[in-house]
Image (cartoon, helix red, strand yellow):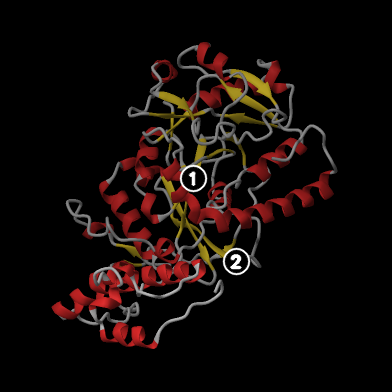
Amino acid sequence: MTHGMIIHPGILIKAAAGGSEAGGQGGKWWLCGRVNNMLWTRAWRRWQRWACVGIGVVVGAWLLLAAPCALLACPPRDAPEEKSESTGPSQESSDAAHLVCDTLSLVPAGRMREPKGSPQLGDNGPYNVLYEWIPSSRTYTNNDSVTYTTHTTPEMVSHVGELASRWSGPLSVAVYVPHSDFCVAAARVARLRACGPAAVREKVSWHLFWPKDSPPASDWRLVVDESTLDCSKDDIASVKGFRTIEGLPYPVNVARNVARSAASTWFVLPSDVELYPSAGLAEQFLKMVSQVATGKDIRVSSVWPRVYVVPVFEVASVVPGSKEELVKQYQRNDAVYFHRHVCAHCQRFPALTDWIKLMGTPGTMQAFSVVKRQYPYHRWEPIYICTKNEPLYDERLSWEGLQDKMTQMHELCLRDYHLVILDRGFLVHAPGIKRRTKSNAKDNAWRDPFVAKNSRVYDQIMEEMQTKFGPSEKCRRH
């Protein structure tokens, strides 16, 4: 009997009746079915043990989960509620932004300008631009100064006040205003002009641009009546913008091109709204350029085309005004070159260590060195003073997708530009040294679709440049 067993009919009756003999060993029911006089095979015993274990798990789970709910009358689980289109923080912010539109009531005299296409993509492109939406009160001519050209969204408008206080020349600011962001921007610009530094009214010219499929939610000719503002209150400080709510990309190169094209002076400094200039940068630069024009600085005057690089740094807490102050912070590790810890190649310029050591002459500016953007600095993205005739930034690239300035710098290399690094002028980012962390990497995962798109556009632009300029061994692709 190796493959079966024989069970006497009487034993089955006793087992079914639950008699004491059914336990086989003093009625021990936990032996799980073992009955006296039964013949077992090993396979049968193994199967029966696992079956008993399974039954025990099921019964135990019921006792732990179902039974307490039955005793305590747990309510049934409701189906998840569908998101309402009329509630939630996003809708509240949108409603608040539209309420701001109601505060626009004044049409300035002579407001007859019509929107145009963007500088690079033109009238057939996806953007409209309104130049001189609010002009500065002071007029600047071609050689009066250097225009600081920058760009912003409504959330960052306040930085323009800091820039106007630090920059001696005019400022040209492009503001991105899709849909209700126009109303928020109008309110924040009005508040800055009425309650901020007087230099904002005097020096800053404001320009607007928006996507054609998301035009301003109100008449773009309107502004806030600044005479009615109460500077002790800020009712829109917490209003979230339309672009943020909708997840729209920021067309940073459209912004750069708009601000630069609108400048009234020959020389411009295209920069970011959170980068603050060193004291006297514009005046000292113009004196240096006059010396170059008269041939007193042969090293610079002998090279063409050229732009003038302004080194960029970030600091822990205090924004320095002079190179002496900057170097002291640098030596204490309270200052580093810009993006040192998040993109080491982006702003590290040739002979940085020597630049820190050579202080130059206070109150003047000279060329520290003349270089080209070639290997190993082919990924360098310097900020520089130039004219309005230099190549435009490619407007197909977004800020979220990164590499937005790489193509323009690559074109400068292909055109054989010389980069003159200034010895004492510099820019400093608003306080706070950025560092790369694991949490930052996770938080930036939202960028991935934009990065993928920029990468495809970048490759397309590189192919276009190779067709236009031909292959180059010196100008490597990033």
**Vertical order, 132 against 335 (above or below):** below
The CA span between labels 1 and 2 is 21 Å
Q: Position of residue 163 (x, y in %)?
A: 39, 38
Q: Which residue is mark 1?
A: 150
Q: Horizontal placement of 378 versus 219: left or right?
A: right
Report helix, strand or loop for mark 2: loop
Q: Is label 1 in a helix, a strand or a loop?
A: strand
Within-10-Å neighbours for mark 2: few <14, some 14–19, many 20+? few
Q: Quadrant of the C terminus?
A: top right
Identity, as a three-letter code, of the amino acid under mark 2:
Pro
Residue 327, quarter of the rendered image = top left
- Give residue 131's position: percent from left, percent from top: 51, 57
Q: How many marks?
A: 2
* In this rendering, position of residue 227 left or right of residue 334: left
Where 48 sits versus 110, above or below? below
Residue beneath the point at 54% across and 26% down: 285
* Residue beneath the point at 46% across and 71% down: 40
- Relative placement, left or right, of 165 versus 124 is left
Which numbered disc flags the more N-terminal residue, 1 or 2? 2
**Residue at horizontal 24 percent and vertical 69 percent from the top:** 26
Residue 383, image x and y in percent?
Answer: 56, 35
* Residue 87 seen in the figure: no
Task: Tell me where residue 387 sits by quadrant.
Answer: top right
Q: Is residue 364 above or below residue 4?
A: above
Q: Quadrant of residue 389?
A: top right
Specify the label residue 142 is tagged with: none
Closer to us: 219 or 211: 211
Residue under label 2:
126
Out of 220 and 359, give the one closest to the viewer. Answer: 359
Residue 380 visible at all = yes
Q: Amino acid at mark 1?
A: Thr
